[in-house]
Amino acid sequence: MSLIHDDFLLQTEAAKRLYHEYAKDEPIYDYHCHLPPEDVAADRRFANLFEIWLEGDHYKWRAMRTNGVSEKLCTGDADPYEKFLAWCETVPNTLRNPLYHWSHLELVRYFGISDTINAKNAPAIWEAANAKLVAPDFSAKGILDKFKVKVVCTTDDPTDTLEHHKAIAAAGIDTKIYPTFRPDKAMNLSDLTAFGAWCDKLAAVSGIDTGDFSGFLSALKQRHDFFHELGGRLSDHGLMRCPGLFASEAEAAKTFAKARSGEAVSPEAQEAFAGHLMVLFGQLDAEKSWTKQLHLGAMRNNNGHALRALGPDTGFDSIGDYSQGQSLSRYLDRLATDGNMPKVVLYNLNPADNYLFATMIGNFQDGTVAGKIQFGSGWWFLDQKEAMEWQMNALGNLGLFSRFVGMLTDSRSFLSYPRHEYFRRVMCNLVGGEMERGELPNDFDLVGSMVKNISYNNAQNYFGLQTNG
């Protein structure tokens, strides 16, 4: 039997029934990802297996470096086939890493290739996959249709023109593609040269002078409105931790003026400035009935040499051990006190914070929306079997698992949609095991409907984004 079979990861009869009858055929609601919208707008065709499978995948780069593969074969200028061979030589050494499961699952689901990935099988895999890439259903749009992806929410800077989103909307494809407002660079005063350049770019795209704080705020609000006009209904913030200090308008204006003039700003003033903006962003989200996502706890760009040579998002990030609770509570409390609490999804990167986040969401539920404050799915280093179970167990023990909005890809790759299958299998195995042990009722109408909802319906109802049926 091949590794990937009908009952992969499903260890009980109840788990098998839950997956095959209630989860397997549900569509995909990908409410947070990093797919390039320009690839969808152009309906990109992929020239070979490297382009669609390895290009830009920092998960695989990390594993390859650990396996002694040179940077030339990861992010360098080596021939695509050489890079592919280096990956196939690495895969046998990824046993017990989720990459082993994901890689085989991707080959089976996209190409019907069940061969074990190794150096011996690499040439045959390369030829078979490349032969299939010429088919219409392997374009960017074809893949979204093949996997029944109803909604995709990309991650976009406020200065983005969103021209590709406009083109996608005009094309009228079956998958709805929406922008997500991610204003992290508006709050980053640690690099004043980069901040000044970003403010200039914001001015250019908005048509509003950002030389003073008033203009800066007006430009940010205008961009938020623009995202809304194009269908965006989500924001996102990738932070080490939420700011716990909140500058007044006058204090924030003073900090902004110093930063724009190139004068260094103290860490406390930086945090308070970010806090002021985060309160504003919460207000804007609440006014438009958006959902705010908070991705907290990443320690980014640890390797300075690699950052200078390769840039960010190349596989040199890790879990951070920041104190999250007090500042997160202060921020959410400020939004609630001001009457500006939007729907919120919290994601933690340090599993030590699972119970903290799972209890924090209960502090700010207000009875207006089921599951209004969500404990998001396992993120980044935690989107694998063990950590998914940790997140689901924490939510199940301390909140309402039945209201969970489920999985997302958080990926730059069009080959990542089997991650939804992987999540659903893990969920069904977890819940099915509890049914078999008598910890949950032996009622498939009840438990199966919960599984079905977490797979798709909860996200559709929660985020409220229009689909094409």
Image: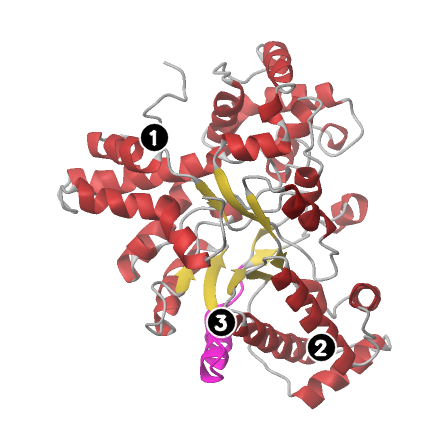
Q: Amino acid at mark 2?
A: Leu
Three-letter amino acid code at the position of disc 1:
Leu
Q: Give 33 or 169, whichever is nearer the viewer.
A: 169
Residue 159 appears in which quarter of the rendering? bottom right
Residue at numbered disc 2: 217
Q: Alpha-carbon neighbours of circle 2 within 10 Å: few (<14), some, or many (≥20)?
A: some
Q: Measured from the top left, where is residue 7 in percent x and y?
A: 32, 25
Name the N-terminal-most of marks 2 and 3: 2
**Residue holding disc 3:** 328
Q: Are marks 1 and 3 in contact (CB under 8 Å)?
A: no
Res. 9 mark: 1
Residue at left offset 74%, top offset 68%: 190
Q: Residue at x 47, y 47 (%)?
A: 382
Q: Please provide percent x and percent y for residue 54.
A: 65, 30
Start-end of magenta stretch = 321-341
Q: Earlier in the sequence, mark 2 or mark 1?
A: 1
152 vs 275: above or below: above
